[in-house]
Image (cartoon, helix red, strand yellow):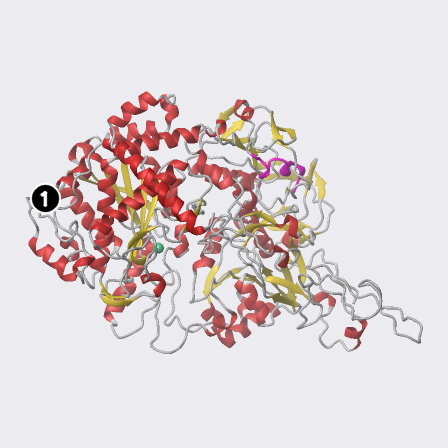
């Protein structure tokens, strides 16, 4: 189907849908007319200000061009000193909360709930607004919603459900300002709460009587307070450029809206818990980056493949209705559909989509502060398209008040629509919950099984805990059980162990007739049953993703893959066979935990290295103890130990037992150390270095270092520029991806035109400058910094780089023999790729089996050479033998005439991950030849083309297939380690973390197990 005909098809379908559903609506309630009841008294002064700050009358609606008066309830002016959206006013979170609590104490229709803290200890709240009657029986209502949310409690009885629906009101959850530079929502939501509490117009009464509106006015509270600081600095320095918001949350910036699966951030957990505890039906998240209101509820293809189709229909219904009503108000620039694909479930709003609710998102138009300014749009923004019949104006004076008008009008239209049809949506909610429970019998799978003999029990427990956090129930088999699985495909999908391949993404839902095999799982295996209300989120996270290279969607919005079992290096088997559900099992009460502790007696302690992340925590917990790593596998205490296993001396057994129990690590006490060769692994002194350009991607690294309690100094490129002896302080410097760092920019920083950009704590800016600070964000690493970094490595330090910072290290000559080839047609859009171990003896690979899945987003294509400046590596398609025109077939040698044929020298051959062997010609005067011990050592590579894709999108994968993914490049006394993958990505790549932790722990022993070439 061509794009145009597809669009027509969708529109026709949509019309049919609208007719069908309006019939259904007629049974529930008649839509009340939107707008003010003339009898409602107006707050004249406030209303006047609204009109004054709205730059054109058509940037307002009949719903928000007035404010209802109240004798008891204070308006936002009580806190703001002016109306919501007034120029120059941006409240801190505590001011917003103060107002919400004023509403609570002055109106029985409002109740404020504390929903948790942020990383920096700031409070998050949710404000419930509804009728007095609904507020009074809020717990009763919640209990009824809980039954609809888990239809098992009513035996999936539809009649029973109908009775509950008749007597229950739904919950509509709105979240504001997760993205800190998108500043309008808090004031819009303050005023919205006021309107909902006091307006006696029929349509607002309708909302109040039939719905609980739940509002979190500030999601990213830490970032909000910093943004207000920056804005205040700007107001105090009106003629100057202001510092960009380099830190939003404590760890990450806009990626705080990519955390709905991994839930690494407090804000995600707090919103998820609120959504599921309230059994809300909608999560509506507010953003501000598109003029003037893009309701991306409808979104674009491809839709996430695991949602209930009912949800897709709800998106269409709600989205088109919403913009339809707003268009009737004559407000320009209101549209839905757009180009946002709805594939990744990582957005905050998707908490609803993955938990049987409805996800929604607005992009309105903000000025990043409260200035009123003229805004000029680009043609792509102001052009008319089929879904944008009344586009935004090419140029307009735009105010925060305009933004607040759009936000509130959209929300009021939505709330009116949703409350009018509350029974319809509650019925859908129940049906979606029921469908989730029926999954094993309908689409499948029946369950995901986590085998009881996974060599990484710590990683396994961690992933299961995450699913528990998502609201999933986890069971544990009390006896072995056997299920039927699809037979292996040919060739078998590469897998670390034979145990891995069988169900790995090959579960075909029983759609195809295929040969089958059986598999028995041991007692103690974990089972995530799909006959539970939140089966969908587990299925989304654990399944495989496939994004077709020829997908019509060309503006891919985000990652195309996230398969958690693969990225976590945890065995997960998708089981379609419903017999799995009959296995003897019990529900795990409390968190899943790996079992740990000390067994046996003796003063030497052995721990198998299985790349479980808790191992690094243990090393740093016993900083003073002697830890050694075995350079070869060995057997002791009747157990097999991998290469890299820990041999520990000098610890108190009780302390170790306690720590190992907490961390889920099995420790074997023995009397003597094994006879295998070992080297010390030290609690290395680590620095995490950031730029002042962006801290977005390094934040994900920092977060995991904190989580696993790896201590580090947090330093900037400017600190490095000032410190000529970094080696005295540090063993390892981590230079995580910058995200937007071309090598020159890392050195040069921001342009030095204009005024300094301070990032410092001051009276005016109390919330910034705490994570790190500088008088001026503009200078970069500089040439001194580069020199200092080089000296650090030269003197035995380890520099760890990834993606753009690997490119930085290569570009500035820190990695002789490594080069990066430009991609031609390669597309790896946040995908999961298969790797192969090249050098299992490298300490970086300790604890790993082969075939690790790694996360790649157009990572650099590394080539190796034995000479400085050599490009090295095999070029794609360069396998055809090169010969000149002459006699014979392409494989024949040419033959000069009138002399005997000469014997041709064998051309040097190398694999894509190797350097081409040196020729005698190159060795004759080897000025550029790298001595064998100084050559880069490739330890991990991308798999061969046909095995490369694990999940997501991969196009022209042959360009990166087989190329090195992880390289250990010696540099005088030290090393630079380069990652083409990103080992720390959004809390999703737990399986790759230990590549970095290994490098850290073995920073001065990276040459262990190395085979050095003779020449
Ligand atoms: Zn945003």
When the figure is inspected, residue 487 is found, relative to residue 923, above or below; the finding is above
Q: Please report the residue visible at 58 percent of the width from the left and 71 percent of the height from the top.
A: 811
Q: Nearer the viewer, residue 439 or 268?
A: 439
User: Residue at the location (23% across, 45% down)?
Assistant: 413
Q: Is residue 530 magenta?
A: no
Q: Is residue 500 magenta?
A: yes
Element on which disc 1 rests? loop
Residue 894 location, x and y as percent? 85, 69
User: Within the image, what quadrant is residue 352 found in?
Assistant: top left
Q: Which residue is mark 1?
A: 37
Tell me if residue 74 can be seen.
yes
Residue 784: image x %, image y %? 51, 76
Crowd class of label 1 (few under 14; some 14 to 19; many from 20; radius 10 Å): some
Task: Give the residues in magenta.
Answer: 496-508
User: Image quadrant of ligand 1?
Assistant: bottom left
Residue 772 position (above or below residue 540): below
Q: Is residue 440 left or right of residue 751?
A: right
Asked if residue 265 shows in the view, the reply is no
Specify whether 987 is left or right of 75.
right
Residue at left offset 82%, top offset 63%: 889
Closer-to-camera residue (946/719): 946
């Amino acid at each position: 189907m061509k794009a145009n005909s597809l669009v027509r098809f969708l529109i026709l379908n949509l019309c049919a849908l609208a007719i069908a559903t309006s019939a259904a609506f007629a049974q529930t309630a008649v839509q009340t007319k939107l707008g003010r009841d003339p009898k409602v008294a107006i707050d004249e002064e406030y209303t006047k200000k609204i009109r004054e700050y709205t730059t054109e009358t058509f940037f307002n609606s009949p719903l928000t061009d007035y404010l209802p008066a109240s004798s008891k309830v204070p308006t936002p002016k009580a806190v703001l000193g002016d109306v919501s959206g007034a120029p120059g006013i941006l409240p801190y979170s505590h001011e917003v909360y103060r107002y919400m609590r004023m509403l609570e104490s002055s109106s029985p229709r409002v109740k404020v709930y504390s929903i948790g803290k942020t990383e920096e200890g700031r409070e998050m709240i949710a404000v419930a607004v509804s009728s007095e009657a609904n507020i009074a029986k809020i717990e009763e209502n919640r209990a009824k919603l809980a039954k609809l949310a888990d239809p098992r409690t009513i035996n999936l009885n539809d009649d029973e459900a109908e009775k509950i629906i008749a007597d229950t009101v739904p919950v509509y959850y709105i979240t504001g300002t997760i993205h800190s530079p998108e500043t309008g929502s808090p004031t819009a939501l303050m005023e919205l709460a006021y309107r909902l509490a006091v307006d006696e117009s029929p349509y607002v009464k309708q909302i109040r009587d039939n719905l609980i509106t739940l509002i979190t006015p500030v999601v990213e509270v830490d970032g909000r307070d910093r943004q207000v600081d920056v804005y205040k600095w700007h107001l105090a320095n009106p003629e100057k450029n202001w510092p960009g918001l380099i830190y939003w949350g404590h760890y990450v910036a806009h990626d705080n809206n990519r955390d709905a699966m991994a839930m690494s951030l407090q804000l995600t957990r707090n919103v998820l818990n609120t959504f599921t505890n309230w059994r809300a039906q909608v999560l509506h998240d507010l953003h501000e980056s598109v003029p003037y209101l893009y309701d991306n509820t409808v979104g674009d293809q491809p839709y996430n493949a695991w949602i209930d189709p009912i949800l897709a229909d709800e998106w269409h219904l709600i989205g088109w209705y919403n913009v339809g009503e707003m268009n009737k108000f004559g407000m320009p620039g209101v549209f839905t559909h757009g180009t946002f694909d709805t594939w990744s479930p990582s957005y905050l709003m998707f908490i609803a989509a993955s938990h049987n609710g409805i996800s929604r998102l607005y992009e309105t138009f903000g000025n990043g502060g409260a200035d009123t300014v003229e805004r000029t749009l680009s043609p792509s923004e102001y052009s008319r398209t089929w879904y944008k019949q009344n586009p935004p104006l090419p140029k307009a004076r735009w105010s925060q008040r305009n933004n607040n008008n759009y936000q509130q009008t959209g929300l009021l239209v939505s709330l009116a629509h949703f409350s009018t049809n509350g029974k319809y949506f509650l019925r859908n909610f129940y049906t979606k919950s029921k469908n989730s429970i029926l999954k094993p019998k309908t689409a499948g799978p029946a369950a995901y099984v986590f085998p009881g003999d996974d060599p990484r029990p710590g990683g396994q427990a961690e992933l299961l805990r995450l699913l528990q956090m998502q609201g999933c129930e986890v069971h544990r088999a009390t006896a072995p059980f056997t299920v039927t699985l699809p037979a292996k495909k040919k060739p078998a999908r590469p897998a670390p162990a034979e145990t891995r391949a069988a169900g790995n993404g090959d579960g075909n839902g029983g759609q195809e007739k295929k040969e089958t095999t059986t598999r028995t799982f041991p007692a103690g295996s974990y089972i995530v049953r799909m006959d539970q209300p939140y089966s969908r989120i587990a299925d989304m996270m654990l399944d495989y993703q496939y994004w077709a290279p020829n997908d019509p969607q060309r503006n891919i919005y985000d990652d195309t893959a996230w398969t958690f079992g693969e990225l976590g290096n945890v065995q997960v088997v998708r089981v379609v066979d419903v017999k799995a559900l009959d296995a003897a099992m019990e529900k795990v009460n409390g968190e899943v935990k790996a079992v740990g502790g000390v067994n046996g007696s003796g003063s030497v302690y052995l721990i198998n290295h299985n790349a479980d992340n808790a191992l690094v925590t243990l090393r740093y917990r016993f900083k003073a103890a002697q830890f050694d790593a075995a350079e070869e596998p060995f057997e002791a205490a009747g157990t097999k130990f991998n290469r890299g296993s820990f041999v520990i001396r000098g610890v108190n057994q009780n302390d170790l037992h306690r720590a190992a129990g907490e961390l889920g690590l099995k420790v074997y006490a023995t009397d003597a150390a094994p006879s295998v060769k070992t080297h010390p692994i030290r609690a290395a002194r680590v620095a995490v270095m950031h730029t002042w350009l962006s801290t977005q991607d390094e934040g994900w690294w920092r977060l995991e270092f904190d989580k696993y309690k790896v201590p580090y100094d947090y330093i900037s490129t400017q600190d490095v520029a000032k410190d000529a002896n970094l080696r005295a302080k540090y063993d390892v410097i981590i230079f995580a991806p910058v995200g937007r760092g071309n090598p020159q920019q890392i050195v040069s920083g921001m342009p030095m035109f204009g005024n300094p950009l301070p990032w410092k704590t001051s009276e005016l800016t109390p919330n910034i400058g705490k994570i790190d600070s500088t008088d001026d964000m503009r200078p970069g690493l500089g040439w001194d910094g580069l020199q200092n970094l080089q000296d650090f490595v030269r003197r035995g330090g380890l520099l760890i780089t990834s993606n753009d910072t690997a490119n930085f290290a290569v570009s500035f000559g820190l990695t002789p023999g490594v080069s990066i080839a430009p991609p031609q047609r390669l597309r790896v859009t946040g995908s999961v790729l298969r790797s192969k171990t090249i050098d299992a003896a490298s300490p970086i690979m300790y604890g790993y089996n082969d075939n690790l899945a790694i996360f790649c987003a157009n990572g650099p294509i590394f080539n190796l050479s034995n000479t400085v400046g050599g490009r090295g590596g095999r070029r794609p398609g360069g396998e055809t033998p090169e010969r000149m025109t002459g006699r014979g077939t392409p494989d024949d040698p040419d033959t000069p005439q009138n002399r005997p044929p000469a014997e041709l020298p064998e051309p040097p051959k190398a694999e894509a991950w190797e350097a081409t062997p040196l020729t005698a010609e190159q060795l004759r005067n080897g000025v550029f030849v790298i001595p064998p011990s100084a050559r880069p050592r490739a330890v991990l590579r991308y798999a061969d083309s046909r095995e490369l894709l694990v999940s997501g999108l991969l196009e022209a994968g042959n360009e990166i297939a087989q190329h090195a993914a992880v390289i250990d490049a010696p540099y005088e006394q030290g090393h630079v380690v380069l990652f083409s993958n990103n080992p720390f990505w959004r809390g999703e790549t737990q399986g790759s973390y230990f590549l970095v932790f290994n490098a850290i722990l073995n920073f001065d022993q990276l040459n262990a197990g190395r085979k050095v070439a003779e020449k």
